[in-house]
Image: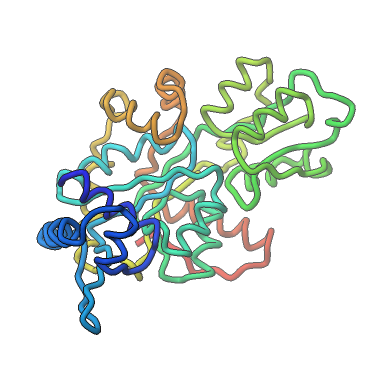
Amino acid sequence: MNSLGDKILQYLIEERSECSISEIARRLNYSKSSISETVSKLERERYVEKIRRGGNVFVKLSDKVLRVGIIRASEYLLAMPFLKELEIKGFKVFIRSFNNGLQLAKALLRGEVIFAYLPVPTAYLTHLLNSQIQPLGYGFGGGAYVLRSREVKSRGIGRVVTTKLSTMELCLSGIKELQDHERVYASSGEEILAMLINGDVEYGVVWEPYATIAIQRGCKVYTSCSEVNVKLCCIPVVNLELVRHETLSTLREEYVKVMSDLDLKSIESMLISKYSNIVDLDVKLLEKTLNKYFIHYEHVNKFIQSIIDKLLSMYSLKSGFTVS
């Protein structure tokens, strides 16, 4: 696909709706004939669909353009071999990174992304808002810690920072000693890191690679989320409203195949570099912290159900969310 084709797809992703040939040409500053020719090529490759209405031709994305959402973390580097395989199979993959699960959940609900890796609590709450958002398969675990600040300032005593409605918060709920601490919510891993290093809080629950950076700066590990029985961190979810049954079957088949055979040590340096650019995190830091994570191959339903049970007690929610 030529660069103009990529520009058209990116424009359609940003607009999140069907657009006319004339509008695309005007916005991208290309001739209408150039846009029309490129759109026809994209249609033949099944990346877009044409809709004729009132003498005008409108264009919309097909589900072969996979809009993927991830959170800035070492963890989702595990997804890169799967996404690469989808590109080999003919999908066009656009990856967008977010600072936290709630931001990503909102994008998923709005249709800005159709496939996402979400913390299990966030995924479940998103499902409650739209029952068509469902898990795809194996989840990831590990790489999350409760840390104590190296030098707590007076205003930081008795305070703990985490992210809202996340696996981090779920981990915190399992530590009795910290239940009386004032809970502070951050919007990103960087913000948690800064508060820990500056001593603005006594404790923080944070994921990799920010945990490693904090430890390098003198923060101490209080416990890991796995040690308080929060072993499943995130799962891949897809919006069934935006994918055809054929596409969903392909996603599930390829996901199981790639993830079942994945060796963390064999992830190509090219994929690590590509991921580093997407999330704006250092390559060496990603390589160092990737091995803190693992893939849940068995009993995923059991782990999800245990997390949902905790959510039910925390937020008085209704159940009904399982992995197929």
Which quarter of the figure has residue 223?
top right
Q: How is the image coloured?
A: rainbow
Q: Position of residue 150 (x, y in %)?
A: 74, 18
In this picture, residue 39 sits left or right of residue 170: left
Q: Which residue is depicted at the point 68% across and 20% down?
A: 220
Residue at 48% x, 42% y: name it: 71
49, 232: nearer the viewer: 49
The spot of residue 239 in percent (x, y) is 38, 64
| Rendered position, 21 above or below 119 | below
Q: Quadrant of residue 13?
A: bottom left
Most extreme residue toward the bottom is 54
Q: Is residue 46 visible?
A: no
Residue 195 to residue 122: above or below: above
Camera-nearest residue between 149 and 6: 6
Query: In screen coordinates, is 286 left or right of 1?
Result: right
At 55% from the left and 62% from the top, the residue drawn is 125
In this picture, residue 263 sits left or right of residue 150: left
Name the quadrant of the C terminus: bottom left
Is residue 86 depicted above or below 285 in this figure? Answer: below
For the image, the number of numbered tags is 0
Residue at (58% x, 46% y) in the render: 167
